[in-house]
Image (cartoon, rainbow, N blue to C red):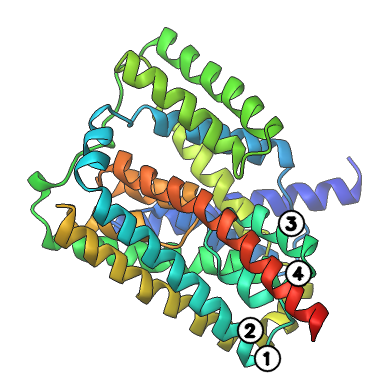
Amino acid sequence: MTASFRALALQWAGLGVLSAAVIAVLKAVHMPGAVILGAIVAAVAVALAGAELELPKASFLAAQALMGAMLAGMIEASIFRDIADYWVALGLALATMLAAAVLVGWLVERSGRLPPGTGTWGALPGAAPAMILMAGEFGGDMRFVAVMQYLRVLVVVLIASLVTQALFRMVDPGAVVATAKAAAPSLAGFGGTIGVAVVGAVIGVFSRVPAGAIIGPLLIGGAVNIWAPAALHFPGWLAWAIFIAIGWTIGLKFRRQMFRALVASLPVMLVSILSLVLLSAISAWLLVLFADRDPVTAFLATSPGGLDTVAILALESRADVAFVLTLQTLRLFATVLVGTVIARILTNKRKTA
């Protein structure tokens, strides 16, 4: 065993031990999203300490695909009735979410504290990898956009965990849809889930759909589950592995060499992120008032975090997962479309300036 391999193995072992410790503490205080939040916190600490760890891209895609397939088992035909009944409230909430992101991004751009284009792409709450790549294509600084996107996910997960815990205590548990039930063991159902994950991910990735690795299995698996309810089954241990893989992928993005630039731009980034969360809460309020949603579901459905991380919080807080996924998916596609239009406008302005 070479010295470098031994050092790498020790770093992974240290990350595993630290993650287990943080998760145990968060579980002890009944923190929603304890698994992914603990994995993120541990990974950030290890990365900023100088560890050069990175999960293979294939493992992250696999985690997303399995997450999409797992979440597909929560989708029921009743969601279409909800959309038909509350389409006005859903439309208003979606428009408010997008307007908040555009406003925050514009204010960051006007502040001049970050490179041109960074504020817009950093504030748009879509799939972080898609936003980073699109920023590069339209002349933004991909490094700063990456920091802002993943910092936003980290902050949103922390805030959403705390707020969800507070809101859940205010809501009658009987009024909240219990979605995180353990599925009955079924080898055929587990095989079906794996099949949905593989086929959906291949279709989603090769069709270049934003966040295709999770959206593909989610859409295909959702159709399967509506057609044959309870056909998909997922073991709890694999769900934990997915949560940890996604948490580590996010946390390990915070490299030590980014630290100086991150510290310098941290105030404006945090203000923009907190402003976005606050403005998104207006959308949640609209859903509570006009769409007959409980506060937990409404807050998570409008939360400007990543689709996968918000879904995990929804699972662990007994929110209406199907509703959360529907609005989050609609926001994802709308964000990509809106972001492209805004980027073209900004690019044209720079050319004429």
Relative to 38, residue 114 above or below: below
Quarter placement of the N terminus: top right
Q: What is the secondary structure assignment of the residue under circle 2? A: helix
Relative to 8, residue 143 above or below: below
- In front: label 4 or label 2: 2
Relative to 351, residue 264 above or below: below
Which residue has dot 3 on it? 133
The answer to which image quadrant residue 227 occupies is top left
Q: Which of the two labelled residues, at mark 4 and mark 2, occupies the earlier sequence position?
A: 2
Quarter placement of the C terminus: bottom right
Q: Which residue is drawn at 27% across and 27% down?
A: 77
Amino acid bearing label 1: Gly
Q: Which residue is drawn at 60% across and 38% down?
A: 212
- Res 112 label: 1
- In front: label 3 or label 4: 3
Q: Mark 2, residues whose alpha carbon is within 10 Å: few (<14), some, or many (≥20)?
A: some
Residue 201 as seen in the image, left or right of residue 234: right
The answer to which image quadrant residue 161 occupies is bottom left
Q: Which of the two labelled residues, at mark 3 and mark 4, occupies the earlier sequence position?
A: 3
Q: Is any atom of residue 298 visible in this view?
A: yes
Which residue has dot 2 on it? 109
Q: Residue at x 27, y 48 (%)?
A: 87
Answer yes or no: do the residues labelled 1 and 3 have beta carbons within 8 Å? no
Answer yes or no: do the residues labelled 1 and 2 have beta carbons within 8 Å? yes
